[in-house]
Image (cartoon, grey):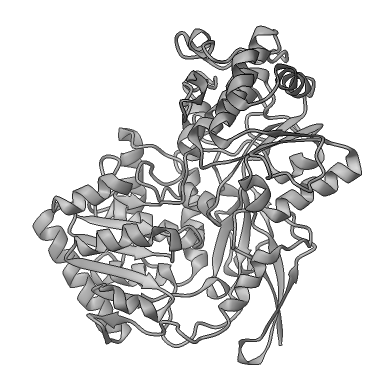
Amino acid sequence: MAIVRSLCGECAVGCGIRAVTGEERSLHLEGDSAHPANGGLLCAKAKRLRDGCALDGRLLYPLVEGRRQGWERTIALLARRLAAVLSRHGPGSVALHVGGGMPTEDYYVANKLMKGFFGSAHIHAPWRGAIDRLHRAAFGEDVMPASFEDIGSAGLILMIGDAVVTDHPVLFDRVQAMRAESGVRLVLVAPAGAGDGLDVDLHLPVAQKAIAPLLGGLLLHVHDAGMGQADGRPPALAPPDFWQSLRPGHDIWSVARTCGLSPQGVRDFYDLWASQDRALSLFSAEDAAISTAILNLHLVTGRIARPGAGPFALGRAANGMGAREVGCLADTLAAHRDFTPDSIVDAQRFWGARTMAQAPGLEGEALLQAIRDGAVRALISIGDDAGAMDWLAQARSGVALSIRASTYADAAADGWTALLSAPVGIEQDGTMTALDRLVSRQRRLFDLPGEVRSGWYMLTRIAQAMGWGDAFHYERPADIYREHVRLTAYGNTGERVLNLKRHAPISNPAYAELTPWRWGEVPFDDGRFPTPDGRARLLPLQLSSDAAME
């Protein structure tokens, strides 16, 4: 029997677990009372971890063209074939798909190999949502400005959309507990039926497509009432004609018609929100229009970078934040850098890159089209992703070389050139970053069965076989973590909030015993943002429906 403190890894809240493991992969789970994300709470999603205990149906060894192969032969074959694709078709001829639940160390190696050595930024991450792009446009960097601790300091919590209630039960339980303890006001804006049985002060039953117009009206209301920030900080810069373009369809009466509410009900909601300096907004990161409205609202009113106030976007990927930190996306470089000439040079120098990607890559439908056109000839997929199976089937059928790291043997029927046996969540070892920048250790609960290998190991071995062993010398996840940490500090004299330099000298034992910690302290608390002039930007409205125009 062994007791291991690890992470649930089933959603982006990042709940800590206390696992008791026994013979024949028996497992008992409970919430880790010492972990700041959940304080001992655990929801039904954690039960899925027990599904990984059974080995029935698992892929326990590599398959090449449907036949079992050893790792040495598999790696050598894939290295030769990838080298041939790159030689014949050049940088950008390889694409990558990534699931959302892998350790940060896996994402780091995948991104480094793709952008620094394959010369390709074609990375499909279907779980990413819109919030990382909006954070960069508004704040100058993809930084979550709020944390779970803000729940305990808030005077009013605005919960937007039914997914906030259903997809993050532990987070909602914390909100309800704080409501009982401190009397925080709770407002739910979600379609009718979503708030049934919930203890809230106000439920506005608004259809999903009408939520953005409702918030746009609130933004106009606080502006016209002169309720902007009054703490002396420089106001956010607005696009030309921002306020004038917001006016059509956003007066209280038009918003009431759009949302199916009474004008008085809309006004009461607006006045309630405006009366609370400590207002925290919880919303899904999937909807660009809602996310845009919320970021603008908090910037205009100054309800950001203070205890109990801020926009808190809820993503669906368990470690989407970690993937974003290391730049494992089509349009960013590692360490929160963009594709600027200086950043490209810095990344190339730091990595010792052979063929550095020079521009953002393709994803989604645009990447599928590049595959159909023959511009992309090889596809690598790491991380199981049930929501991406249709996309993967189309992409795989269009390339000559398809490589997938998978946990289940039934993937062999899908026609992949090579299948690499990958770990399930309870077998992963590395770090993950929760929604609020909290970095925690995900520790392996069971030894890797059969010939299963970690994602970073597979990609490192391929890189070594292709002649890049000097740049891919990793023997354990701690080696990758240290390099990731050093890259966040490389050339960073304060331009970026993401700077993990305190862990640059971390030892292997210290990494093994790493306790949860949050980077970024309280972002933007000095009133400055990582933009050229230090000011945030209001974002052009993205009303996702035509409801506001009816």
Query: For the point 76% across and 18% down, which residue is it?
Result: 271
Of 362 and 472, the residue lying toward us = 362
Query: For the point 56% across and 38% down, which residue is it?
Result: 143
Q: Quadrant of residue 454?
A: bottom left
Q: Is residue 531 above or below residue 2?
A: above
Does any portion of residue 521 appear in the rendered image?
Answer: yes
Q: Quadrant of residue 259?
A: top right
Residue 254 rendering spot, x and y as whole percentages: 59, 15
Query: For the point 29% across and 63% down, which residue is it?
Result: 393
Numbered circles on residues, count: 0
Of 62 and 225, the residue lying toward us = 225
Query: For the point 49% across and 45% down, which residue is it?
Result: 488
Residue 351 rendering spot, x and y as whole percentages: 35, 53
Q: Is residue 475 above or below residue 300?
A: below
Q: Quadrant of the N terminus?
A: bottom right
Q: Quadrant of residue 218?
A: top right
Image-based side of 319 in relation to 151, left or right = left
Residue 324 rendering spot, x and y as whole percentages: 47, 47
Q: Is residue 538 above or below residue 514?
A: above
Residue 140 rendering spot, x and y as whole percentages: 49, 29
Residue at the farthest bottom position:
23
Image-based side of 1 in relation to 185, left or right = left
Does any portion of residue 528 appear in the rendered image?
Answer: no
